[in-house]
């Protein structure tokens, strides 16, 4: 199979680029895939395709740009030129832009593929029905939230024109089937990026215990409460704790972390890593005692939770929305906190950092949960889905051919 993937891709900073990197890494090692065509956004640096493992050929075509109205034309041209056997779209609603028309035009691409009879699957990482538009940073206006809801319904109907829409949580399947009467929705879990053949040691380095969070901050991911909660734990326990804030501003909130750094410059042992390169990720997680999710809302399955599990880490999570569901569905364990209460967050962190046996036990459970769905297994599920689509198209054409010949 010559497989095209429409996605942002490193060094892009557009959402889901890291996920695409790991998809490609594992697709290329599958013997069913003879070539991968990356239909990516334009970046200044070269695309990161220098994999060390043996695998198939990768062709890169930079054919779209964030907020460009021409994306639908340019990506279609690239598909026509490369002639893939199948197309996978790695999407969320703001993938092609945060301007409504640009975003909508990009999301029409699965319909274009269907009209051209090219087997296609959309991997949809979130659905607007499950996003709190206020806390997620879209809009706090009730009127605008209704408008977004209407737009979201229209865009979802567009996306559902794909041959198959894959979502990462069972709840999303249920909503799409009940609200939209969809018959082409399939659950394919998020998957775990890197799974070592060796179990983690569940140890942490000498020195201060690192309380780490990882992501793009400023909208529904805010770090002030975490800093204040760690201060409370230091005060009550006397433990040597370091706050590690790994990642960057959310593109919608430029300057957020710089302001936090200024506002909390009086707090000792707070480290800001900036953008974390792929090769730096293992060290970041391995050196952490606990991974915190200081979220006020959720917008889909959490890649960071799967990463934390793959490194055998204890986690502290808000008791809300998709994260709580994901934990239940996939078998993760952690300490939960009330996202509106700093003392609740402090208590959850303290419970883990003061009890090494409990911290290790949580890490072991999370490692088991993470290793149940390695990316190699996830990519096989996508290839099986494409095979079913292709078989169905062949059967349908045979039926059509027989009816016309008789």
Image (cartoon, rainbow, N blue to C red):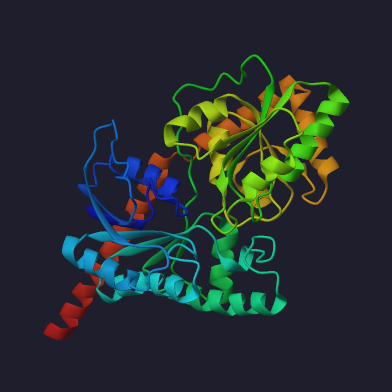
Give me the residue at 54% from left, 60% from top: 126
Total labels: the figure holds 0
Judged from this view, the residue extending furthest toward the left is: 405
From this view, report whether residue 158 is shown above or below residue 390: below
Instruction: Report whether residue 368 is seen.
Output: no
Give me the residue at 62% from left, 41% from top: 331
Q: Position of residue 171 (x, y in %)?
A: 60, 60
User: Relative to the observer, which residue lies in front, 330 or 264?
Assistant: 264
Q: Position of residue 185 (x, y in %)?
A: 47, 65
Instruction: Report whether residue 91 is seen.
Output: yes
Judged from this view, the residue extending furthest toward the right is: 236
Q: In this view, does 395 lie to the left or right of 359?
A: left
Give me the residue at 49% from left, 74% from top: 100
User: Relative to the observer, which residue lies in front, 187 or 29?
Assistant: 29
User: Relative to the observer, which residue lies in front, 171 or 251?
Assistant: 251
From this view, report whether residue 393 is shown above or below residue 386: below
Q: Where is residue 176 in the image (x, y as percent from the top left)?
A: 54, 69
Q: Is residue 3 left or right of residue 226?
A: left
User: Relative to the observer, which residue lies in front, 369 or 313?
Assistant: 313
Quarter-of-image position of residue 343: top right
Q: Position of residue 233 (x, y in %)?
A: 82, 30
From this view, report whether residue 257 is shown above or below residue 8: above
Q: Is the C terminus in the top left, top right, bottom left or bottom right quadrant?
A: bottom left
From this view, report whether residue 296 is shown above or below residue 314: below
Give me the residue at 43% from left, 72% from top: 102
């Amino acid at each position: 199979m010559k497989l095209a993937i429409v996605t942002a891709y490193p060094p892009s900073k557009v959402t889901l680029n890291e996920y695409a990197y790991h998809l490609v890494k594992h697709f290329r090692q599958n013997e069913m895939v003879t070539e991968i065509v990356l239909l990516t956004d334009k970046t200044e640096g070269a695309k990161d395709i220098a994999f060390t493992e043996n695998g198939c050929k990768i062709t890169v075509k930079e054919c779209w740009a964030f907020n460009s109205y021409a994306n639908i034309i340019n990506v279609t041209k690239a598909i026509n030129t490369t002639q893939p056997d199948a197309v996978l779209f790695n999407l969320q609603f703001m993938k092609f832009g945060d301007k409504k028309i640009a975003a909508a035009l990009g999301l029409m691409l699965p319909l274009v593929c269907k009209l051209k009879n090219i087997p296609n699957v959309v991997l949809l990482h979130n659905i607007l029905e499950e996003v709190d538009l206020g806390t997620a940073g879209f809009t706090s206006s009730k009127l605008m939230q209704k408008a977004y809801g209407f737009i979201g319904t229209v865009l979802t109907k567009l996306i559902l024109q794909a041959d198959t829409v894959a979502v990462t949580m069972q709840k999303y399947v249920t909503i799409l089937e009940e609200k939209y009467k969809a018959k082409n929705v399939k659950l394919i879990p998020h998957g775990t990026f890197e799974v070592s053949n060796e179990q983690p040691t569940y140890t942490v380095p000498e020195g201060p215990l690192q309380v780490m969070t990882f992501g793009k901050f400023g909208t529904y991911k805010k770090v002030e409460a975490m800093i204040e909660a760690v201060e409370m734990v230091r005060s009550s326990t006397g433990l040597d704790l370091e706050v590690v804030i790994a990642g960057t501003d959310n593109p919608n909130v430029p300057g957020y972390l710089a302001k936090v750094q200024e506002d909390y410059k009086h707090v000792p042992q707070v480290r800001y890593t900036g953008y974390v390169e792929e090769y730096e990720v293992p060290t970041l997680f391995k050196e952490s005692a606990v991974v915190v999710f200081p979220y006020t809302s959720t917008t889909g399955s959490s890649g960071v939770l799967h990463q934390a599990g793959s490194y055998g880490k204890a986690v502290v999570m808000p008791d809300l929305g998709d994260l709580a569901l994901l934990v239940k569905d996939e078998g993760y364990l952690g300490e939960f906190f009330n996202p509106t209460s700093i003392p609740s967050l402090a208590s959850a962190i303290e419970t883990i950092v003061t009890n090494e046996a409990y911290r290790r036990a949580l890490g072991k459970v999370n490692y088991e949960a993470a290793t149940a769905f390695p990316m190699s297994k996830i990519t096989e599920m996508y290839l099986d889905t494409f095979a079913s689509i292709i078989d169905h198209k062949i059967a349908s054409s045979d039926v059509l051919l027989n009816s016309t010949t008789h």
